[in-house]
Amino acid sequence: MPSLRIVVAEDDAAIRELLVHHLAREGFRCTETIDGPSTLRAVRAGTDLVILDVGLPVVDGFDVVRTLRREGRALPVVMVTARSDEVDRVIGLELGADDYVTKPFSPREVIARVRALARRGGLTADAAPVLLRFDRLEVDEAAREVRVDGADIGLKPREFALLLQLASNPGVAFSRTALLQAVWGFDFDGDERTVDVHVRRLRAKLEDEAQLPRLVYTIHGFGYKFARG
Ligand code: CA
């Protein structure tokens, strides 16, 4: 973390949701798009990697990747193909895709490709564990500790994951839904109040232990954000 941003471009809702489900559980931040133009817009708005269905409506995956390369965007692209005759074109070097998977694929396979590309590209997904410092607070992912003045304040696993998600992205507003997906995963059965309860506990521990100034801000009607450094 900060977690890698991935645009998942796929018009088949079942496949798209399957991918997003598994990627989000792995801590990736996903933006879903359903056709060529929305994919181009999402990539231009900023992302680290694209998973790109070849058979997208309006502008197909081949034209999307060509357009991105023409614009000088070097971000990794994983093409998803449905037909064996597409594979020949996908692996044609002139296209500029970095890797491909063929349908049907397992989500595990796609995640492995994404991780490999992220490593190759020096992206953040496989970077060293996070060590964040804010005044007297330290968030140490490797040790799974949150320390105030050097002393571990004993966060529970979800509290730790929630703080890590927020503190890795200072100043970024997260909706309750986004936090649920990032910290609890899509399988989680609870509702958005779960997030509120954990934020309350987190604040109590941070504040009780250290009288630290408020670090986790409420955004009314939306969610939470961590103080900007
Ligand atoms: Ca398709």
Image (spheres, rainbow, N blue to C red):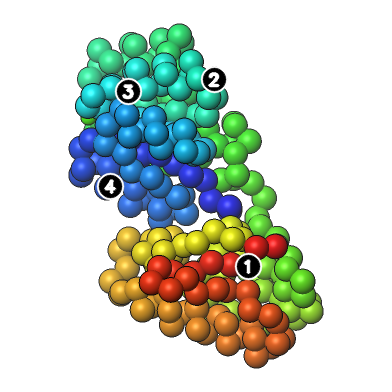
Which residue is denoted by mark 4 in the rendering? 18
Which residue is denoted by mark 2 in the rendering? 72
Residue 102 disc label: none
Task: Single out the residue that lies furthest toward the front.
Answer: 220
Left or right: where 192 falls relative to 104: right
The image shows residue 14 at horizontal and vertical percentages of 20, 44
Dot 3 or dot 2: first in sequence order is 3
Which residue is denoted by mark 3 in the rendering? 61
Indicate the quadrant where residue 171 lies.
bottom right
Tell me the distance, in whole angstroms, between the alpha carbons under discs 4 and 2: 30 Å
Q: Is mark 1 within 8 Å of ligand 1?
A: no
> In the rendered image, is residue 185 in sight?
no
Residue at 27% of width from left, 47% of height from top? 17
The answer to whether mark 1 and mark 4 are in CB contact below 8 A is: no
Which residue is denoted by mark 1 in the rendering? 227
Q: Nearer the viewer, mark 1 or mark 4?
A: 1
Q: Is residue 127 above or below residue 129?
A: above
Secondary structure under the numbered disc 3 in the rendered image: helix
Local crowd at mark 4 within 10 Å, few (<14), some, or many (≥20)? few
Secondary structure under the numbered disc 1 in the rendered image: loop
Dot 1 or dot 2: first in sequence order is 2
Left or right: where 100 falls relative to 115: left
> In the rendered image, is residue 40 in sight?
yes
Local crowd at mark 3 within 10 Å, few (<14), some, or many (≥20)? many
